[in-house]
Image (spheres, grey):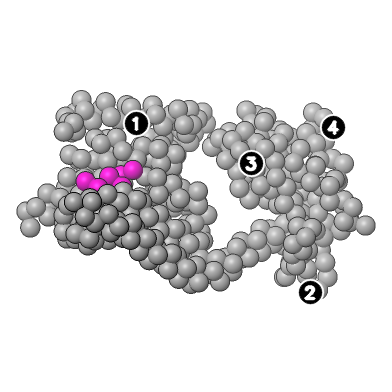
Amino acid sequence: MRSLKKNFSRGIVRANPIFILLLGLCPALAVSTSLDNAVGMTGAFTFVLLAANIIVSLLREQIPDRVRIPVFIVIIATLVTIVDLMLQGFVPVLSESLGMFIPLIVVNCIILARAEAFASKNGMIDSIADAVGIGVGFGLAMLSISLVRQLFGTGSLDLFGRHLFTIPPLADNPVVFFLLPMGAFFVVGILLALFRWMGVSRSE
Amino acid sequence: MTQKNGFLPVLFLTAVVFVSVVALIATDAITREPIAAARRAAIYRRLQSLFPTMDDFAYDEESGLYTPFSEGDPLGLAFMAYTRGFGGTIAILVGLAADRTLRGIEIVSHRETPGLGARIAEPAFRDLFIGIEIDDIALSRDGGAIDGITAATISVEAVVEGVREAVSARLKHFE
């Protein structure tokens, strides 16, 4: 029970994929322009990570060492394709807004890293805890990045079509820089420095 | 150890790929119909925003022309226009009425800068195309009917150019 909690909470702060491990930055930078995208990407990402961790942990005794990386990649790519087709067929609205980001999950190195570093060495229950913890950590990181970018880039916050609030002077002169790719690097860098400075995160 | 089970890894990987292929074929079989239906529904929705009275449409694969119908009567034509914007390809659905005026445009997909070029997808810009003559598809500074958007010149020019070229290329279907 204790280890379960540890495996779960590790991904949130101590081994946060974005801010500590600096993994999966490419999709994180690409889709963190709005809270909606952050939530959708986190959902799809967590599902694939969870399924991949479960399958890899169940097969960990059988997978020959020499081909483990190709096996992981085949498993992950298959899961992503299934998610992609299912979304297109049954949730076309979500598929439309996340369309091009879903295939990006295949190359999201966090999932491969968790398969290699955790699921291939631990049991199913622990791997589930690890996947959910990493998913929450990824989600929090995505939300904090996209919160800053959407707020400064558009001057207002919306979540799934519901308007939260507007900062009038900012909405009249939005800092579009934050929505551009370079703005993503800027925000991630500032947040990284901030969390280090606050002592929230320390490199392992 | 690697010598002893030399073929095992190969067999294992093959088996994994086989299972993966089976899973994908099954997923494809389950989702093919819903995906086709969802695509058709999306096209229907976009066509209907150009031709509000439309109740059915036909699609000719060879020419790429959509023909919207209202109670069996054709309302005009619609077709895709592709153009190169600031961030990548912009896909536009163009609606043409039978009297050779535009019924408007729909931005199907684009990768323009949010807040700047992305404003081409907003009604304030798209609606400028509604009801104008084919010859007026040009920016107002070039004597056309389309007002530009500040700080989005490249995107706006791309859309105007793309629509004009697509329209003139399709005019021969109109006779």
Callout 1, which amino acid? Val
Quick check: is A112 in the magenta stretch?
A: yes
Pinpoint residue B49: horizontal percent, then vertical percent: 68, 58
Amino acid type at circle 3 is Thr
Q: Which residue is under mark 2?
A: B71
Between the C-alphas of marks 2 and 3, the distance is 35 Å
Give the secondary structure at mark 1.
Answer: helix
**Residue B40, horizontal then vertical, whole percent:** 63, 65
Query: Circle 3 marks a residue in which chain?
Result: B
> Which dot, 4 or 3, sits closer to the camera?
3
Do the dots labelled 4 and 2 sit on one chain?
A: yes
Q: Residue furthest right?
A: B175
Quadrant of the image occupied by residue A144: top left
Residue B8 appears anywhere in the view: yes
Residue B162, by quadrant, is top right
Front tag of 1 and 3? 3
Q: CA distance from mark 1 to mark 4?
A: 46 Å
Give the residue number, with chain letter if any, for mark 1: A188
Q: Which residue position holds label 4? A: B143
Chain that bears disc 1: A
Mark in the foreground, 1 or 2: 1
Is A43 left or right of B128, judged from the image as shown? left
